[in-house]
């Protein structure tokens, strides 16, 4: 990897920078001789598929997760709390979203496990029981009539 590629990755993947998430700006900052916005967009797309840049993304994400104190257990706990809150206020759509996030966390969704089988985790019996309980709770909730209709029918 060249120094400019590394600089591009740093500019693109570092939260808080003005170039964060913007390929064109990141490319133009890393490669100052490039004066064409169109060329910068094309080249940034090329770099974002480069294996070395992708590896740097993983490094930056790991560093950020460590700084913020995020790990799988904390994320699972936060998603479980979101699921429980959504179910307590009878918002099955939000509970479903939280459930999907939990599935993604454990690489149980189609997108994560198909592209990254190395991320798939062996679930313990407790994990499976928890996911089954969440699913049962969602299925047993009163979701037949959307909340808006309940409000209209009680008026």
Image (cartoon, rainbow, N blue to C red):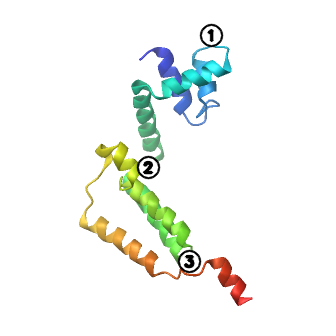
Residue corresponding to mark 1: 33
Left-right relation of 10 to 33:
left
- The residue beneath circle 3 is 90
The residue shown at (45%, 75%) is 138
Whole-percent x, y for residue 141 in the image: 49, 81
* Mark before the other along the chain sequence, 2 or 3: 2
**Few, some or many residues within 10 Å of mark 1 (<14, 14–19, 20+):** few
Please state the horizontal and vertical placement of residue 112, each as a whole percent of the image: 39, 48
Q: Quadrant location of the C terminus? A: bottom right
Q: Which class describes the residues within 10 Å of circle 3: few (<14), some (14-19), or many (20+)?
A: some
- SS under mark 1: loop
Q: Could you tell which of marks 2 and 1 lies nearer the N-terminus?
A: 1
**Labels 2, 3: front one:** 3
Q: Of all residues shown, which one is farthest toward the right?
A: 155
Residue 118 sits in which quadrant?
top left
Residue at 53 percent across and 72 percent down: it is: 92
Q: Which mark is residue 88?
A: none
- Please give the count of numbered marks on the rendered protein: 3
**Residue drawn at (42%, 59%) of the image:** 102
Label 2 to label 3: alpha-carbon separation: 28 Å
Label 2: which residue? 70
Instruction: Name the residue rendered at 54%, 79% in the picture.
Output: 143
At numbered mark 3, what does the secondary structure look like: helix, strand or loop? loop
Residue 80 appears in the rendering: yes
CA gap, disc 2 and disc 1: 38 Å
Comparing 131 with 115, the one in front is 115
Relative placement, left or right, of 94 versus 71 is right
């Amino acid at each position: 990897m060249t120094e400019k590629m590394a600089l591009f990755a740093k500019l693109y993947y570092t939260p808080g920078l003005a170039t964060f998430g913007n390929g064109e700006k990141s490319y133009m900052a890393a490669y100052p001789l490039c004066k064409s916005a169109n060329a910068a967009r094309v080249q940034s797309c090329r770099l974002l598929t480069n294996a070395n840049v992708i590896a740097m993304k993983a490094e930056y994400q790991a560093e950020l997760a460590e700084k913020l104190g995020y790990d799988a257990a904390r994320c699972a706990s936060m998603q479980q709390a979101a699921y429980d809150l959504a179910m307590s206020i009878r918002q099955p759509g939000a509970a479903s979203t939280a459930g999907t996030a939990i599935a993604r966390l454990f690489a149980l969704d189609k997108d994560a496990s198909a592209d990254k089988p190395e991320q798939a985790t062996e679930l313990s019996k407790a994990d499976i029981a928890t996911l089954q309980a969440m699913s049962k709770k969602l299925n047993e909730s009163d979701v037949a009539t959307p909340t808006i209709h309940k409000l209209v029918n009680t008026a």
